[in-house]
Image (tube, rainbow, N blue to C red):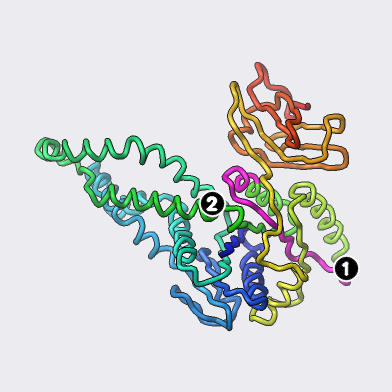
């Protein structure tokens, strides 16, 4: 089963592209389910058909589902939340405030993505298209199981036994609420579910992320930042879809400047994301609503390419710790040291090898460090980051 996740800044048309992808896949014979975790959009709006929380057939070979994030939150967080509310009540926080404070921002969408695990295990579909909310924070938070694993495997069993042993004594000495078995069971269940979702979404053979963007400076910056964090946490981007490009047949002088700006931004997109495939899609003259128009949108984006294929395979970037700092590893086949130029400016890293140029947004852990050097190890460029005795100017660490 294939899983495709679509994400991008709000308003770029990612839901339309996701729906168009589903239509194209179903036309090719794949049993396709579209699942939206974005509360701002619904598949019903684009298919122009009623879609509810239950899996709804919308056409031969196509189903859709609008996730109720609040109900998923209640189902997966309630037992943990109840203990947290009791604890805050004991500390003097009003119940309504405690309930609001006990919900971590982004949790509702994480729990929505647990449905991915359910659908993959059911095996009823060939393709699951997930229309994510306009942020990569959800996918970053899915790295929580890696952090939780150490706690769950080592400290959690000890803590559970200690709590069970001291509960009778503490109950006689204080009114402080003590976590019960329901709380510990809920934490274990949450860990298992999130870990299962993360393993599915980081499986290069099964899952891919497709970034949708417009040719606007702020949108491109957000997409580059999203791409960096997706790569760091093991999520593979197999395509970048550039939506709403002004077509060549628009010759009105009013749009001439816009076309020049878009051409410049498109060069930035290619420098930032290649060799990941980049698919431009023209700006249509109407809203793309309904199965017929969505199919036209799908043909515009993909042409004759099978939409369910893995369109790009690579591990674009890895960061690992090394004594005194970090090493950022980029795969650059057929490159040589003689043609290499690496420098950073603010939170951006620029890599030029001959005519090949790469422009990356650095993760926060590297933004505080300086470039210490760069070298090739096999077909990977390894860039060392560390702290200098004195920081230089805004542009530092040329290698």
Stretch in magenta = 228-253
Which residue is painted at 40% across and 37% down in the image?
150
Q: Secondary structure at mark 2?
A: helix
| Label at residue 139 | 2
Tell me what residue is drawn at x 82 percent, y 32 percent. 341
> In the picture, which quadrant includes the N terminus?
bottom right
* Above/below status of 171 relative to 21: above
Q: Relative to 304, say whether 273 is above or below.
A: above
> What residue appears at the point 77 percent right and 42 percent down from the top-left corner?
358
Say few, some or many: other residues with alpha carbon within 10 Å of mark 1 (under 14 / 14 to 19 / 20 or more): few
Question: Is residue 235 found inside the magenta-colored segment of the image?
Answer: yes
The x and y percentages for residue 196 are: 45, 53
Does the magenta segment cover residue 279? no
Q: Position of residue 71 (x, y in %)?
A: 38, 65
> Label 1: which residue?
248
Q: Nearer the viewer, mark 1 or mark 2?
A: 2
Instruction: Choose top left, top right, bottom left or bottom right for residue 361.
Output: top right
Distance between the Cα atoms at labels 1 and 2?
36 Å
Q: Is residue 251 left or right of residue 69?
A: right
Q: Residue at x 57, y 73 (%)?
A: 32
Secondary structure beneath label 1 = loop
Instruction: Please indicate whether residue 246 sits to the left or right of residue 349 in the image.
Output: right
């Amino acid at each position: 089963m294939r899983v495709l996740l679509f994400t991008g800044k709000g308003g770029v048309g990612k839901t339309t592209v996701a729906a168009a992808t589903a239509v194209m896949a179903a036309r090719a014979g794949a049993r396709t389910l579209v699942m939206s975790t974005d509360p701002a959009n619904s598949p019903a709006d684009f298919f122009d058909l009623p879609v509810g929380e239950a899996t709804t057939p919308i056409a031969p070979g196509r189903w859709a589902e609008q996730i109720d994030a609040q109900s998923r939150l209640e189902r997966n967080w309630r037992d943990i939340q109840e203990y947290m509310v009791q604890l805050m009540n004991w500390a003097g926080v009003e119940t309504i405030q405690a309930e609001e404070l006990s919900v971590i921002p982004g949790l509702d969408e994480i729990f929505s993505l647990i449905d991915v695990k359910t659908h993959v295990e059911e095996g009823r579909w060939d393709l699951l298209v997930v229309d994510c909310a306009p942020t990569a924070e959800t996918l970053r938070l899915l790295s929580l199981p890696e952090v939780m694993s150490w706690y769950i495997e080592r400290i959690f069993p000890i803590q559970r036994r200690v709590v069970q042993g001291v509960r009778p004594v503490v109950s006689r000495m204080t009114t402080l609420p003590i976590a019960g078995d329901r709380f510990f069971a809920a934490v274990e269940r949450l860990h298992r579910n999130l870990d299962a979702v993360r393993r599915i979404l980081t499986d290069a053979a099964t899952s891919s992320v497709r970034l949708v963007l417009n040719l606007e400076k702020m949108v491109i910056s957000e997409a580059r930042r999203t791409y960096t964090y997706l790569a760091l946490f093991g999520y593979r981007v197999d395509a970048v879809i550039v939506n709403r490009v002004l077509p060549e047949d628009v010759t009105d002088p009013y749009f001439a400047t816009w076309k020049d700006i878009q051409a410049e931004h498109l060069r930035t997109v290619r420098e930032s994301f290649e060799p990941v495939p980049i698919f431009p899609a023209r700006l249509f003259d109407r809203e793309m609503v309904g199965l017929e128009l969505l199919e036209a949108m799908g043909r515009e984006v993909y042409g004759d390419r099978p939409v369910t294929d893995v369109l790009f395979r690579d591990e674009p970037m890895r960061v690992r710790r090394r004594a005194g700092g970090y090493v950022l590893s980029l795969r650059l086949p057929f490159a040589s040291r003689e043609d290499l130029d690496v420098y950073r400016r603010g939170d951006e890293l620029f890599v030029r090898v001959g005519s090949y140029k790469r422009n990356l947004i650095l993760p926060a852990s590297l933004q505080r460090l300086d470039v210490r050097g760069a070298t090739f190890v096999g077909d990977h460029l390894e860039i060392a980051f560390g702290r200098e005795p004195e920081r230089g100017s805004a542009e530092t660490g040329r290698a």
